[in-house]
Amino acid sequence: MEQAIQEILKRNRLSVTDSRVKILELFLSQAGALAHGDIEKKTGEKFDRVTVYRTLQVFLGKGIIHTIPTADNSIRYALCRENCAEGHHHDNHVHFVCSDCGNTTCLDDITIPQIQLPTGYQTQQVEMLVSGICRECKS
Amino acid sequence: MEQAIQEILKRNRLSVTDSRVKILELFLSQAGALAHGDIEKKTGEKFDRVTVYRTLQVFLGKGIIHTIPTADNSIRYALCRENCAEGHHHDNHVHFVCSDCGNTTCLDDITIPQIQLPTGYQTQQVEMLVSGICRECKS
DNA sequence: AAATATTTTGCAACAAAGTTGCATCTTCCT
DNA sequence: AGGAAGATGCAACTTTGTTGCAAAATATTT
């Protein structure tokens, strides 16, 4: 994993620092999306709040992670699949929020269907957000 | 308009107060969705912040308005069409955020398409959020 | 229409979330 | 190893949202 992380950082011309490594580790070691708060807690509160904010901003800018809007007004972050160009994702998968466990996951294989907007509207990006019960919580 | 507003409040067994009337007026007098901040500003800062929060909560609970999650982590509120039951909307329309003027609108006539989730996932609610350029800004 | 009961409001105080400037420390490059 | 560039932590601050409570407004009863 250590390898992979270095690779990601280097590919994006970012210096390799403790916080960046630890935060990327977090993302890589679990499937779901993370809110800012989760990150602060799960890194063992080793980093300053400000550092976490700034690290997320940098990752966002480089297209390493993307945001997921949620109904409860708390932005989640998730890793982008391979090939997001700097600042320009192709992030056309559906996001799922479990109303039981609260986890947010990217359903990478479910593509957002095309829709026909009224004339005069021009689409740039589409987000689709499903809430419900996830596989783990259903059983 | 005054009529209509009273009607809405009475139908929902809410007492008719200045703040509620003014805030409903705001929603009725313009198409788009409003963020909490917009409301504070546009009412001419006559009401306490707390009152605005509470009023929105009440309207939400009664199904008079619904929330729209946005990518920038600021919840918008918009009027529900006619017949939302208390606490239970049928809110299956698409939301549009203009990246130029910033306005958020309900595309009431565009229905969210059905999607097929992976087995094991159970859907409760689906949100679809399109960003782009709106009719007004395009010209 | 007045009196009472019920709601709603505004204030104060607080908690959480996010931002900025700046000095210090790390990382990277040669 | 040394210096430039960049990242971090701290402090201070702003914005956003919440809660308890007394005062005020609204609704209800007679």
Image (cartoon, coloured by chain):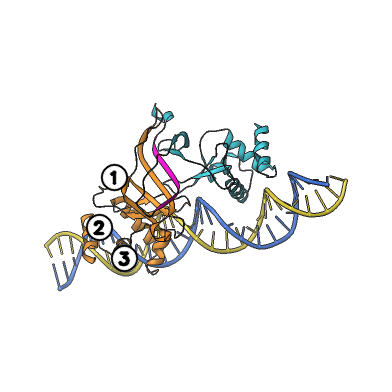
Chain colours: A cyan, B orange, C blue, D yellow
Q: Regarding mark 3 in the picture, which secondary structure is present there? A: helix
Q: Amino acid under label 1?
A: His
Q: Which secondary structure is most common in the magenta stretch?
A: strand
According to the image, label 2 marks what residue? B14
Q: Residue at x 23, y 66 (%)?
A: B2
Q: Amino acid under label 2?
A: Leu
Q: Residue at x 46, y 56 (%)?
A: B99
Residue B22 badge? 3
Q: Residue at x 37, y 61 (%)?
A: B52
Chain letter behind tag 3: B
Left or right, A77 with respect to B91, comes to right
Which numbered mark, 1 or 3, is in the foreground of this view? 1
Please identify the quarter of the rendering in which residue B124 is found.
top left
Q: Which residues are magenta?
A: A120-133
How many C-alpha atoms fall within 10 Å of the one at disc 2: few (<14), some, or many (≥20)? some
Left or right, B89 with respect to B7, comes to right
Residue A91 badge? none
> Marks 1 and 2, Cα distance to the nearest angstrom?
22 Å
Q: Earlier in the sequence, mark 1 or mark 3?
A: 3
